[in-house]
């Protein structure tokens, strides 16, 4: 193996994460070419089925060439099934619009306020509620976070702030610094939680300036990743997780139970083991939000429960995620 000398490494610095972001694959034909499945082009829906294809090249590199059932590919490739009408699958499946309290602020659960920090993601997951969310005006980061901060200052019951989206780490680190300066106005907030898929799909986002920001916060920090399959992990993801932990964050993961992708006990068990190897504990296993265009991913509740019972027999309790569904109007995620 040839390794670069330190001097060589300095003269060819790691590409900036924004470059990887911009270079993402956005064309379905190109994606199929990269994974050697050109013949599937006939099965692509016209116009990406109303939700653009987007996937970083580093994530594509983890797909198995020539495998049309690859679990990473199936999360991002538009399918004809998305165009089928399915009763009960709607645009605002989780009642987000009703929980809005200020620009980009959702307050559904006691003590926790969720900020829609950004409307963008590095990857577009076909099963996501985001495919229909009207982000236009609903970004908490707009105007130096002013509306959100004013609202949060007035509500002393909130001790935990959750940055979500979209992906909050789509924001420049300078935008996150702006928020943390504002947090000085909110002494009642003691925890900051970040819901992000970027450490998994674009681990180069976890760079020096971001880690310095995270490590310098006065708050306790929790980073909730989103991975659905053990094969989403590679050395780059492991390194990002290790850095996050070194910066003081507790690492958790949420997954979505997806038919044809992770709906068997071996796959779920392997995911939990792989998470723990990266220093991450499984948190939630979500039943799919019933969003229009995602019905073909749904696993029925009886099978979901049976799967979790099966992994409970195989794994230590701390590696068994909580199976939940989000129900509009509930006071918490609903356990199944
Ligand atoms: C899921 C969610 C939370 C976090 O719930 P936890 O059970 O604490 O993980 C908070 N606010 C909103 C609006 C949510 O959708
Ligand atoms: S919000 Fe999460 S699940 Fe939805 S597209 Fe973005 S990364 Fe994927």
Image (tube, rainbow, N blue to C red):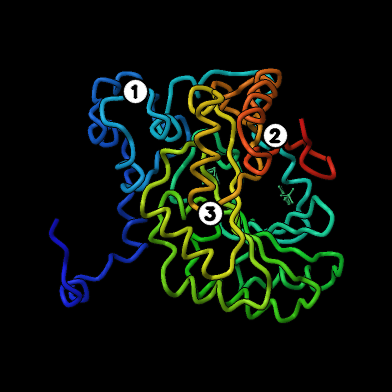
Q: Dot 3, crowdedness within 10 Å: few (<14), some or many (≥20)? A: some
Q: Residue at x 59, y 47 (%)?
A: 253
Question: Distance from label 1 to label 3 (Cα)?
Answer: 31 Å
Horizontal and vertical percent position of residue 124: 46, 42
Quarter the C terminus occupies: top right
* Residue marked by disc 2: 323
Tag nearer the camera, 1 or 3 = 3
Horizontal and vertical percent position of residue 239: 41, 59
Tag nearer the camera, 1 or 2 = 2
Q: Residue at x 44, y 64 (%)?
A: 206
In the displayed structure, 110 sits above or below 155; it is: above
Q: Which mark is residue 279?
A: 3
The tag earlier along the polypeptide, 1 or 3, is 1
Question: Distance from label 1 to label 2 (Cα)?
Answer: 28 Å
The tag earlier along the polypeptide, 3 or 2, is 3
Horizontal and vertical percent position of residue 5: 16, 72
Horizontal and vertical percent position of residue 312: 67, 30
Q: Is residue 228 left or right of residue 308?
A: left
Residue 146 appears in which quarter of the rendering?
Answer: bottom right
């Amino acid at each position: 193996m040839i390794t670069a000398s330190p001097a060589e490494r300095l003269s060819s610095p790691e590409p900036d994460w924004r470059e990887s972001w911009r270079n993402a694959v956005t064309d379905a034909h190109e994606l199929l070419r990269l994974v050697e499945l050109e013949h599937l082009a006939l099965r692509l829906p016209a116009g990406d089925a109303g939700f653009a294809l987007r996937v970083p090249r580093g994530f594509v590199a983890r797909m198995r060439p020539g495998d049309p059932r690859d679990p990473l590919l199936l999360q991002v490739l538009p399918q004809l099934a998305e165009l089928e009408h399915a009763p009960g699958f709607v645009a605002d499946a989780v009642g987000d619009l009703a929980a809005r309290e200020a620009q980009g602020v959702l307050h559904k659960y006691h003590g926790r306020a969720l900020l829609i920090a950004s409307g963008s993601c590095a990857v577009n997951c076909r099963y996501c509620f985001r495919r229909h969310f009207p982000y236009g005006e609903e970004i908490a980061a707009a105007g130096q976070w002013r509306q959100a901060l004013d609202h949060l200052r007035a509500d002393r019951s909130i001790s935990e702030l959750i940055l979500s989206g979209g992906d909050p780490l789509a924001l420049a680190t300078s935008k996150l610094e702006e928020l943390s300066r504002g947090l000085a106005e909110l002494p009642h907030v003691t925890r900051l939680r970040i819901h992000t898929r970027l450490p998994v799909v674009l681990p180069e986002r976890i760079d020096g300036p971001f880690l310095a920001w995270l490590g310098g916060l006065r708050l306790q920090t929790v980073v909730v990743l989103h991975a659905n399959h053990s094969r989403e992990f590679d050395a780059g993801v492991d390194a990002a997780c290790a850095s996050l932990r070194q910066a003081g964050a507790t690492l958790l993961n949420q997954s979505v139970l997806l038919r044809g992708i992770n709906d068997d006990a071996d796959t779920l068990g392997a995911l939990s083991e792989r998470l723990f190897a990266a220093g991450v504990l499984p948190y939630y296993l979500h039943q799919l939000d019933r969003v229009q265009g995602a019905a073909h991913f749904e696993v029925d509740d009886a099978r979901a429960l049976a799967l979790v019972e099966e992994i409970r027999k195989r794994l230590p309790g701390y590696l068994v995620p909580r199976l939940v569904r989000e129900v509009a109007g509930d006071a918490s995620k609903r356990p199944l």
